[in-house]
Image (cartoon, rainbow, N blue to C red):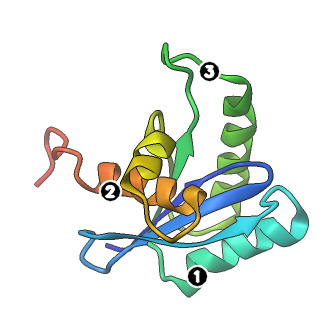
Amino acid sequence: MRVLALDYGAARCGVAVSDPTGTLATPLEPVLRPGTKKGFARVVALVTELQAEHVVVGLPLSLSGRDSAQTTETRAFAAKLAAAVAVPVELYDERFTTSLAHQAGGTASLDSRAAAVLLDEWLHLPMKEGTD
């Protein structure tokens, strides 16, 4: 299953996509100003262009696990995206992804490397109970 991961921010939205087997996460070019009409349209277009079957949006919780100032905006973005695409959109805790992406280095944008870390974590979650 091909999965698209988004590290939402008002200025830039980091983007990463899995390979068709759902094993590897690759950072892509970030989308600028995803909250604008043009930026949001680009995010929606990526879902189709990349043939994503699932979208994971990083949820910026505080270190204590509570909502932060950015959390409300991200939840609204994810809800708007879920209404605009025909695939499931899921929120996933993104704490420490930017720090891990920074430590790992690389040439892609930090936002998209953080999306790749988020996607890699999500892809390698233990199977949920009752699933094969």
Residue 92 shows in the view:
no
| Residue 10 in picture, x, y percent from top left | 79, 49
In-image side of 22 versus 30 (left or right): left
Q: Residues within 10 Å of mark 2 (few under 14, many from 20)?
A: many
Residue at 47% x, 49% y: name it. Answer: 102
Residue most toward the top? 64
Cα distance in 3D space between marks 3 and 1: 30 Å
Cα distance in 3D space between marks 1 and 2: 21 Å
| Residue 128 in picture, x, y percent from top left | 19, 41
| Residue 64 in picture, x, y percent from top left | 49, 13
Q: Which residue is mark 2?
A: 120
Residue most toward the left? 132
Kind of element beneath mark 2 = helix
Picture quadrant of residue 3: bottom left
Residue at 44% x, 66% y: name it. Answer: 106
Picture quadrant of residue 28: bottom right
Q: Which residue is mark 1?
A: 48
Residue type highlighted by circle 2: Asp
Kind of element beneath mark 3 = loop
Image quadrant where one finds the C terminus: bottom left
Residue type highlighted by circle 1: Thr
Residue most toward the right? 37
Cα distance in 3D space between marks 3 and 2: 23 Å
Sooner in the amino-acid sequence: mark 3 or mark 2? 3
Residue type highlighted by circle 3: Asp
Sooner in the amino-acid sequence: mark 3 or mark 1? 1
Q: Which residue is mark 3?
A: 67
